[in-house]
Amino acid sequence: MTKQEMLQLKMTATRVRMGIIEATHGGKSGHPGGSLSAADVLTYLYFKEMQIDPQNPQDPDRDRFVLSKGHAAPGLYSVPAAWARVFPPQPAWHWPPR
């Protein structure tokens, strides 16, 4: 991975963290710690490793991710919100997009 790719992933992870804080604060509920601790892993998986086409998120051949750490759900919801080219930017507590 190049330094530029690493920097881009770090900036994306920061956007994911911001979405987590906005979601838990805006929803007046949740435990941000579990989501914040998973932000780097989720960002790497979704933006670098997993085969998911942001232009075709319902592709039946896409990779799937199962999150069993329920307290980290705001982190998982913040990842697609970071795909500004797929979903219009909006607070993660409005997930799924309406």
Image: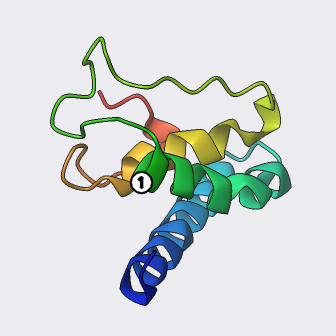
Q: Residue at horizontal 53%, vertical 58%? A: 19
Q: Residue at horizontal 57%, vertical 27%? A: 65
Assess disc 1: are there few (<14), some (14-19) or many (≥20) residues with their C-alpha within 10 Å of its C-alpha. Answer: many
Q: Secondary structure at mark 1?
A: helix
- The answer to whether residue 91 shows anywhere in this view is no
Residue 96: image x %, image y %?
40, 28
Task: Name the image quarter holding residue 5.
Answer: bottom left
Who is closer to the viewer here, 79 or 50?
50
Residue at mark 1: 47
Task: Name the image quarter holding residue 21.
Answer: bottom right
**On-image quarter of the C terminus:** top left
Who is closer to the viewer here, 27 or 1?
1
Q: Residue at horizontal 23%, vertical 49%? A: 88
In this view, 86 is above or below 2: above
Q: Residue at horizontal 82%, vertical 50%? A: 34
Say whether residue 40 is left or right of residue 15. right
Q: In the displayed orientation, state which residue is furthest to the front.
A: 1
